[in-house]
């Protein structure tokens, strides 16, 4: 608490209000009278408590989640005293915050790193809103957000960008600077928001601690990443829909199985700390409150009759990677009929959603690549054991479902691999005559892997053996998606370099998917 004004502690909310705050714990927006302590005086900060910015997420037609975290000393545990604090919030229909349409308060609780999650209701569909927080005399930056269209409305257009893999050490977040200039309804993040490793000398930027293990380590790492002004600005301008991949906990973990030889019980304790820190730093609803080592992250978002997003979690419930993980020749373990990526519950939930969806475009927002990439020349196949093709039982349950049930226009968007790919999704990747049942757009990293390159000699050489691959590029950037009723357009936006700041952006390739015709067509 070294950065706090000494007078702050006396205004901290006492134990009684801490208990009253149990409702805030459930994530409900508080609109009633403020606790009396805050009327007797306001906490005074000598340092800005809003160092991590503001964010919003998971838009509904009548509301969004607003997020911030009080952290006057963000890289050293946050710098807050161990008491709950009352944080006021306001939502306005103008960017000057003059026409406030909703306001209330919520607790920033020490148990959750003094993070604030407000679920605002009572807003109008398909509108821009502006919001801010205040605690005592400190006022946050103003954020902008947008509600979703009404569930049953006819919607003609939707624009979003998706991104993943933002290793802080390996490059600048220039992609976010350019993303902030796009006309978007939302941003989708597909995971590797942080990386867990220790510092590596000589990189563009340097991690702030050895490999993160404790809750405070994870909090400080999120704070380091969120200190980036380009990332903060992208959060402040658009609502985000987030899911995680592996590095929010540990490289290539699967369910309760860690990367290294650690007992599952011990790993689950680490997973609990990592999941909690993730919740604390993301604009998630109370349905995603961590419960010990579990956190319910998969969920559905709807944008009128134009698009539905099934946001998936392929880490928490999957079976272990076969053949010892890594990129390996296919071994017998790959053909385990019990293999699962989603777990039974999530898989049934996904199939039910797809079956009942009335949306034109059905988006699966998820982590690891579904299209096959065999990197071995000639007979025999070598694949990544962390991807869907190493779980063919699960993969073909899904692809056969798409073929048999024919939900409207399935589009899979994917992160993880630090390169851009476009795939035809087929009921058998090894049979060129099998039907195309969907389209996959794999997005490159924001910064992971450094500057990257346009071509990769191995991938280029293997393309004839992988006819489902329509495009590959290994530069950095993000993916822009513009949806209309007739057409889905995807633009691969590429930053020239990420190891130098402020490099320009350009479109490296564009694809369209026509309504009713799975498979991408390159247009530029
Ligand atoms: Fe990554
Ligand atoms: Ca081969």
Image (tube, grey):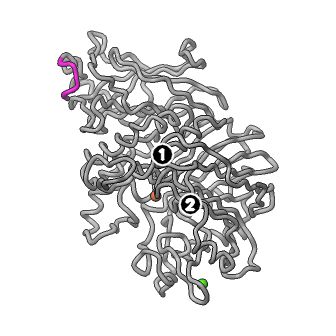
Query: Which one is in front, 511 or 123?
Result: 511
- Which residue is label 2 attached to? 453
Residue 129 belongs to magenta span: no
| Quarter location, residue 475 | bottom right
Instruction: Tell me where residue 447 appears, x and y as whole percent.
Output: 48, 51
Question: In the figure, 313 relative to 75: above or below?
Answer: below
| Magenta extent | 2-6
Query: Nearer the N terminus, badge 1 or badge 2?
Result: 2
- Which residue is label 1 attached to? 500
> Dot 1 surroundings within 10 Å: few (below 14), some, or many (20 or more)?
few
Residue under the point 69% across and 59% down: 410
Does residue 42 appear left or right of residue 10 in this picture?
right
For residue 513, say whether it is visible. Answer: yes
Instruction: Tell me where residue 434 appears, x and y as whole percent.
Output: 74, 78
Instruction: Tell me where residue 261 appears, x and y as whole percent.
Output: 27, 72
Query: Which one is in front, 224 or 429?
Result: 224
Query: Which one is in front, 397 or 379?
Result: 379
* Secondary structure mostly taken by the magenta-highlighted segment of the chain: loop
Does residue 394 appear left or right of residue 47 in this picture?
right
Does residue 486 appear left or right of residue 333 in this picture?
right
Dot 2 falls on a residue whose secondary structure is: strand
Instruction: Give me the C-alpha separation between circle 1 and circle 2.
Output: 15 Å
Q: Which mark is residue 54?
A: none
């Amino acid at each position: 608490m070294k950065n706090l004004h000494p007078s702050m502690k006396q205004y901290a909310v006492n134990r009684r209000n801490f208990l009253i705050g149990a409702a805030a714990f459930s994530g409900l927006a508080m609109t009633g009278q403020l606790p009396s302590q805050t009327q007797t005086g306001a906490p005074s900060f000598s340092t800005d408590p809003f160092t991590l910015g503001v964010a919003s997420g998971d838009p509904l037609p009548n509301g969004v989640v607003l997020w911030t975290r009080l952290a006057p000393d963000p890289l050293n545990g946050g710098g807050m005293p161990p008491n709950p604090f009352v944080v006021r919030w306001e939502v306005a229909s103008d960017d000057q915050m003059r026409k406030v349409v909703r306001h209330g308060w919520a607790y920033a609780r020490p148990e959750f790193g003094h993070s604030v999650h407000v679920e605002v209701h009572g807003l109008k569909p398909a509108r821009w809103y502006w919001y801010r927080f205040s605690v005592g005399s400190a006022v946050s930056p103003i954020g902008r957000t947008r509600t979703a269209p009404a569930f049953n409305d006819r919607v003609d257009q939707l624009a979003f960008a998706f991104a993943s893999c933002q290793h802080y050490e390996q490059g600048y977040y220039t992609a976010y600077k350019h993303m902030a200039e796009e006309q978007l309804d939302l941003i989708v993040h597909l995971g590797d928001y942080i990386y867990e490793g220790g510092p590596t000398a000589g990189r563009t930027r340097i991690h702030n601690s050895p490999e993160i293990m404790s809750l405070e380590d994870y909090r400080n790492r999120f704070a380091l990443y969120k200190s980036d002004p380009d990332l903060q600005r992208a959060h402040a301008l658009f609502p985000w829909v987030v899911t995680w991949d592996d590095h929010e906990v540990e490289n290539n973990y699967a369910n309760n199985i860690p990367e290294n030889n650690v007992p599952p019980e011990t790993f689950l304790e680490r997973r609990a700390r990592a999941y909690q820190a993730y919740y604390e730093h993301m604009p998630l609803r109370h349905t995603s409150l961590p419960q010990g080592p579990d956190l319910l992250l998969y969920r559905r978002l709807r944008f009128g009759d134009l698009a539905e997003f099934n946001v998936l979690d392929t880490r928490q419930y999957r079976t272990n990677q076969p053949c010892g993980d890594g990129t390996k020749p296919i071994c017998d373990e790959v053909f385990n009929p019990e293999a699962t990526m989603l777990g039974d519950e999530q898989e049934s939930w996904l199939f039910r959603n797809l079956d009942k969806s009335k949306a034109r475009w059905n988006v699966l927002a998820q982590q690891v690549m579904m299209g096959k990439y065999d990197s071995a020349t000639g007979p025999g196949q070598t694949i990544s054991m962390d991807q869907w093709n190493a779980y063919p039982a699960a993969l073909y349950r899904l692809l056969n479902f798409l073929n048999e049930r024919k939900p409207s226009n399935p589009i899979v968007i994917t992160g993880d691999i630090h390169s851009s790919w476009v795939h035809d999704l087929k009921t058998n990747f090894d049979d060129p005559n099998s039907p195309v049942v969907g389209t996959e757009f794999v997005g490159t990293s924001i910064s992971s892997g450094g500057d990257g390159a346009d071509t990769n000699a191995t991938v280029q050489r293997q393309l004839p053996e992988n006819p489902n691959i329509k495009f590959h590029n290994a530069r950095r950037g993000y993916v822009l998606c513009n949806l209309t009723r007739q057409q889905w357009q995807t633009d691969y936006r590429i930053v020239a370099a990420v190891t130098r700041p402020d490099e320009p952006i350009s479109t490296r390739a564009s694809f369209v998917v026509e309504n009713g015709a799975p498979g991408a067509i390159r247009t530029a």
